[in-house]
Structures are given as C-alpha cells and as structure tokens.
Amino acid sequence: MSRQDINRSGEMEVFVRAVELGGFTAAAKACGMTPSAVSKLVARLEKRLGARLINRSTRRLQLTPEGCGFYERSVTILADIGEAERHASAGEQVVGHIRINTSGSFGNHVLAPLVPAFMALYPDVSLEVFHTDRIVDLMEERADVAIRAGPLKSSSLTARKLGATRKMIVASPDYLRRHGVPRSPAELERHCRIGFSYSRAIEDWPLQSGSQMMTLPATRNLLVGDGEAMRHLALAGAGIARLAAFTVKADLDAGRLLPVLEELNPGDVEEFYAVYIGQGGPLPARVRALLEFLRENVRL
C-alpha cells in the first residue's frame, strides 16, 4: 500500500481514541468499528512505524515510550487539522474582507449607492473599493472582484453580466453657448472632443444617419485617464464628451449637461461584468453573496 493510500489522520484518530478511552472496545464503539478492526489497525500502524506503541500484557492499554511520543504528536496534529477545517469552513459564512476593483464612473454612480444596503445585509463583511479605469491583474491587485466594461480577455477569469448602458455625446450649456451647438458630424468635427489616454475597444465616436454609419476620432489635445475626469471636464465646459448614460443621467436631468446630436446616436451599448478568478470552482460565501447582490440590484 502506497503512502498516498494510507489514511494517516484516520489512524491517528482511532489510536488517540483507544488511548483516551482506555481500550479497543470503547474506541471501536466511538469510531463505529469492531474491536478486532481497531486491533488490526493499531497492529498495522505499529508495523508501518517499526515500533511498538502499546503493551498488551495488561487488561488496560499501556503506552510504550514510543507510543507516548506518538500519542502526544497525534493529538497536536489532529488539533491542527481541526483548526484548519474550522478556518476553511468559515468560507461558507458571509464574513470577511472583500476587495473590489472598478472604474471611477461605475464606483461613484452605481456601486457607492448600493454599499449601505449590502453592509446592512452582511454586517460581518468589510469592503475595500479601489477605482481605476485601467485593466488590472486580479491576482496582482489581490482583488476578489473587478467590475469592468466589455468582453473578457483572459480565459482564466469568469464573468457575470451586470447590465448594459447606452453611450451619449454630451456637453455643458456654457460650452455650447461659447462654441455653438453642432448640428452635423462635420460641425462636431470642429469641436474639442475629449478622449481617453488609454486604449479602448472602441476608440472612435460612431454616428449613424439613416443607413449610413460614420466615426469621428476624439481630439488629441485633451485626454483623460478615466470616465469621471472626462465627465468633470465636460461639466466645466472644456469640451464635448461621449460617456455612458448612467454616469450623466443626473447631470442631464439637472440641465448641467445637454445631449449633442442624439438623433445620430447609433444606440450602441457598453456591457458591464463582475469579473473574478476561477472557472466553476468554489467561491467563498462572501464573494458569492456580493455577486448575487450585484446581479439583483445593479441598474444601468
């Protein structure tokens, strides 16, 4: 029998029970075995170890010096195993720390308003939220969940779709007063169109007139590293921006931003996903709880 086929912790547990209960019969009853099975197990254990553990000359078990040492170490090992199992089983409870990585736009406009409800529902969970628009390595960033737009690029990750949002071209009333309202793609081309400083799946601004599709690139004289910075520059009247509808809804409702060339909006959407490491393997309960909460409550 190979070492891999031996249930050494099981042997230790039976041996410890026999010692603590004072005999094979009591140990057999406690372990759901027969006395002869316990006796044979101890004999196999002694043969494998090459040492006598128990003197059988008396009616009660009497440990040899080797048996005393093996008993003490077995008790310690079994206690460590029990502690390890208790620690792992805590993963089935909605407790612990969750590290979330998401964009500033999603974090501010969607996630932040949901945090109080999640914390009230799971008071034993602590959250750590990091905002960045750049694509991160979940392992390197020690993130449990990342919330990102667009399809997965890594097969080692799993994604759950949270929703989709339209993109809109917007500008502040002040900017439009100073520079005029563009009425056509040709007029829009003469305006400052705020762009992103990092590569994106869709760099250009798509426009549609009837069946004709066209695109305009963002200008290179005003670039930003995240969507919230773009929104704030648009609010300040620095240029025209193309943003996810959920990030500008409140600004549109309040009149702080106005839609531009909405009649030429092709209706393309940006999909958002909760991304995490693993492909069907078990997840800690705290992460499962967060993913389910986001699925039920995110509205874009």
Image: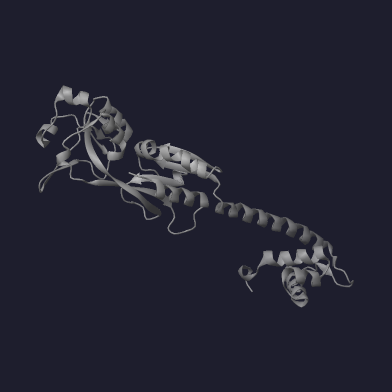
Above or below for 223 versus 26: above
Q: Nearer the viewer, residue 188 or 52?
A: 188
In the shown orientation, is residue 21 left or right of residue 203? right
Residue 201 seen in the figure: yes
On the image, which quarter does residue 84 sit in?
bottom right
Above or below for 122 versus 47: above
On the image, which quarter does residue 237 sit in?
top left
Q: Position of residue 190 (x, y in %)?
A: 13, 30
Q: Position of residue 136 (x, y in %)?
A: 39, 43
Q: Residue furthest bottom?
A: 36
The residue located at (70%, 58%) in the rendering is 78
Q: Nearer the viewer, residue 150 or 292?
A: 292
Q: Point out the image quarter for the N terminus.
A: bottom right
Above or below for 272 versus 251: below
Q: Nearer the viewer, residue 43 or 148?
A: 148
Q: State the colouring used for the structure image.
A: one colour
Q: Point out the image quarter for the C terminus.
A: top left
The residue located at (77%, 61%) in the rendering is 70
Q: Residue furthest right?
A: 58
The residue located at (20%, 45%) in the rendering is 267
